[in-house]
Image (tube, rainbow, N blue to C red):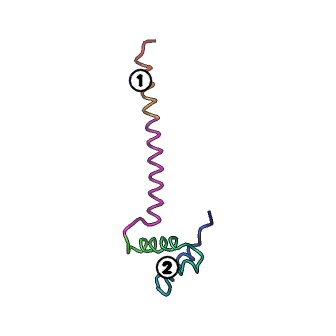
């Protein structure tokens, strides 16, 4: 995977696309990126500015962290349930 483009490059590309001097596909080709990449940057910039509904970059990062934490807690909960069942069964059976 190629390294990500610097934020300043992205901002400048979005600014150039918004001026409308060139089509998005022509601008993307001249910048050496794909049209879909530039379109995604434009859409994300609109979301960050509040022009479109969607998750900002910070919200996406937070959501990923929360989902990871939820998976971890579910796993810990399952382990505790199994341990409780094991010890409960051990206490009920005659020795």
Q: Is residue 45 left or right of residue 2?
A: left
Q: Residue furthest top?
A: 95
User: Picture coordinates of residue 10 (x, y %)?
Assistant: 54, 75
Numbered disc 1: secondary structure: helix
Vertical side of 93 occupied by 1: above or below: below
Q: Residues within 10 Å of mark 1 (few under 14, many from 20)?
A: few
Q: Residue at x 47, y 40 (%)?
A: 75
Q: Residue at x 44, y 57 (%)?
A: 63
Residue that mark 1 sits on: 88
* Residue in front for this viewpoint, 80 or 14: 14
Gap in angstroms between the C-alphas marked 1 and 2: 65 Å
* Residue in front for this viewpoint, 69 or 15: 15
Q: Residue furthest right?
A: 2
The residue mark sitting in front, 1 or 2, is 2
Residue that mark 2 sits on: 24
Magenta-colored stretch includes residue 57: yes
User: Picture coordinates of residue 24 (x, y %)?
Assistant: 49, 79
> Magenta region, mostly helix, strand or loop?
helix
User: Picture coordinates of residue 69 (x, y %)?
Assistant: 46, 49
Vertical side of 63 occupied by 36: above or below: below
Q: Residue at x 53, y 79 (%)?
A: 13
Report the magenta residues as a range: 53-78
Ranked by sequence position, the earlier of labels 1 and 2 is 2
Numbered disc 2: secondary structure: helix
* Residue in front for this viewpoint, 41 or 59: 41
Q: Residue furthest bottom?
A: 21
Q: Residues within 10 Å of mark 2 (few under 14, many from 20)?
A: many
Q: Residue at x 49, y 72 (%)?
A: 41
């Amino acid at each position: 995977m190629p390294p990500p483009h610097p934020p300043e490059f992205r901002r400048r590309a979005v600014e150039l696309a918004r001026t409308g001097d060139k089509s998005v596909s022509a601008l993307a080709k001249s910048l050496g990126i794909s049209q879909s990449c530039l379109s995604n940057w434009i859409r994300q910039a609109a979301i960050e500015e509040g022009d479109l509904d969607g998750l900002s970059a910070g919200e996406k990062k937070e959501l990923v962290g929360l989902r990871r934490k939820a998976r971890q807690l579910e796993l810990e909960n399952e382990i505790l349930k199994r341990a409780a069942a094991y010890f409960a069964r051990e206490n009920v059976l005659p020795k």
